[in-house]
Amino acid sequence: MEPTARTQAAPDRTADSLTVVGPLGPGYDAILTADALAFLADLCRNFGPRRLQLLTDRQEAHARFQAGAKPGFDPATQAIRDAEWTVAPLPADLLDRRVEITGPVDRKMIINALNSGANVFMADFEDSNAPTWSNVLDGQINLRDAILRTIDFTHPTTGKRYALGEQIATLMVRPRGWHLPERHILLGGAPVSASLVDFGLFFFHNARQLIANGSGPYFYLPKLEHWREAELWNDVFVFAQQALGIPVGTIKATVLIETLPGALHMDEILYALRQHSAGLNCGRWDYIFSVIKTLGHDPAFVLPDRAAIGMGQPLMQAYSQHVIRTCHRRGVHAMGGMAAQIPIKNDPEANAAALNKVRADKEREVADGHDGTWVAHPGLVAIAKDIFDAGMPAPNQIDKALDPVDMDALEAVLLELPTGPRTEAGLRQNVNVGLLYLEAWLRGNGCVPLYNLMEDAATAEISRTQLWQWVKHGAQLDDGRTVTPQLFRAVLGEELDVIAQTVGTERFNSGRFSEAKDLFTALVLDPHLADFLTLPAYDLLATAS
């Protein structure tokens, strides 16, 4: 059923009124109530200007990096890094997080993830969710129903019914990043922060029920680049709790360390959120993307194939261990990275090889000192849990302290160039995966299984920024060829032909491959590296949603 156009506004208590311009679909009026919109309007009025200033600060930092400056630990916050302090105690249902599953906020996914046997389900409005208006609002409805335990789903073709079991995972929610707008809600005629929309609507409708359920409003915070961005979130949390009469500190939030600048602000981020902190997470795919974005303007810093940038690379190992060292010193969880593999049902040998990679990755994480890990598919929960059960009998290993390191030496390793081959196969993988993912995203699907991996926006960002860098600097492949715009266009055409043959003519012609090709090409060949693929892509998505 298609939504019908309708507008609803919060009470106009100032000259700037908040207005919903997105169509009102079934059940949306229960989310977009006058009280909820008034609460959201207060959030946007109080914190929207600071958000915009922080985004300006980001742009100025990026300009310095593009001009050759390198990020580093901030001398002005040395006292925070040197002092002995810990974050506030955690609630009982966040003490054991050994396996967390993530995925978008569609109804079936929420039920399966909560039933998966994982300790935590991170419901994602961000990288695995294409933010169509219907995805965003339906996601809010789905989460409300899950918290009320009224959620169910019947498959439209098989008739199979899905419902919650007795034991379900603890729920955490990832709102969209500070950089993203929500164009279907306007304040004073301008789009509001997507972060505040996702957080505000969820918190307003569900915080009290979550507390009544014996849990609480728990969040994951993405793509922070500076401790002041964490400080903004902390002030939002304080305001929101006070507005609803909920004790300050009830909210708990884990920050994804998925930017290189953010990795150099770990202590400061935890300190800014110390009333509300639930630790840090290694968002390693976005982190690789950020390394390229931050350092990739330097022609001496040209990365190898994305497949070569594993956790054994010195900069990635140092990043992961710095998360553990920092979190454990501050008395909170250090969460490991994503296992993106999907079980391969029709190829036992390939499936065994994939699962062996998962095992090796999780064994490394628990041995290093991580307190839990991420998986993308329910079929990986038992494997990850077995490994963490064996290596971490207690609910966590926060008491495992890593030896101190010289911070200057650590800074140097975090800025170290990864080594490895640069191949035609890697070039083709970037083109193929980038096109397939972007086309699916434009159709409203942000969580896409490709080649037995669950891809989200982070891996698409690695693909397009790596291609941009290789073209920009005329990178040389191992076979001696230079990556030129002409070579990129030739490979793009060939991979489009492969995709058309694979998906079939009807699917290819009815999809959004032409738009994906045009946007992907423009981003790769632009002399200036765009901050996020999802910003120009949202222009196309918003016109179709």
Image (cartoon, rainbow, N blue to C red):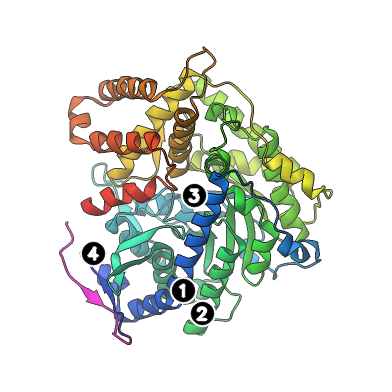
How crowded is the residue under tag 3: few (<14 C-alpha within 10 Å), some, or many (20+)? many
Name the residue tied to disc 4: 22
| Badge 1 amino acid | Phe
Q: Earlier along the polypeptide chain: callout 2 or callout 4?
A: 4
Image disc number at residue 102? 3
Q: Is residue 298 left or right of residue 115?
A: right
Marks 1 and 3 sit apart, C-alpha to C-alpha, by 28 Å
Marks 1 and 2 sit apart, C-alpha to C-alpha, by 10 Å
Marks 3 and 4 sit apart, C-alpha to C-alpha, by 27 Å
Q: Main secondary structure of the magenta part?
A: loop
Q: Camera-side residue: 502 or 422? A: 422
Name the residue tied to disc 1: 47
How crowded is the residue under tag 4: few (<14 C-alpha within 10 Å), some, or many (20+)? many
Say whether marks 1 and 2 touch (CB < 8 Å): yes
Give above or below for 112 relative to 422. below
What residue do we see at 41% from left, 56% from top? 125
The part of the chain drawn in magenta is: 1-14
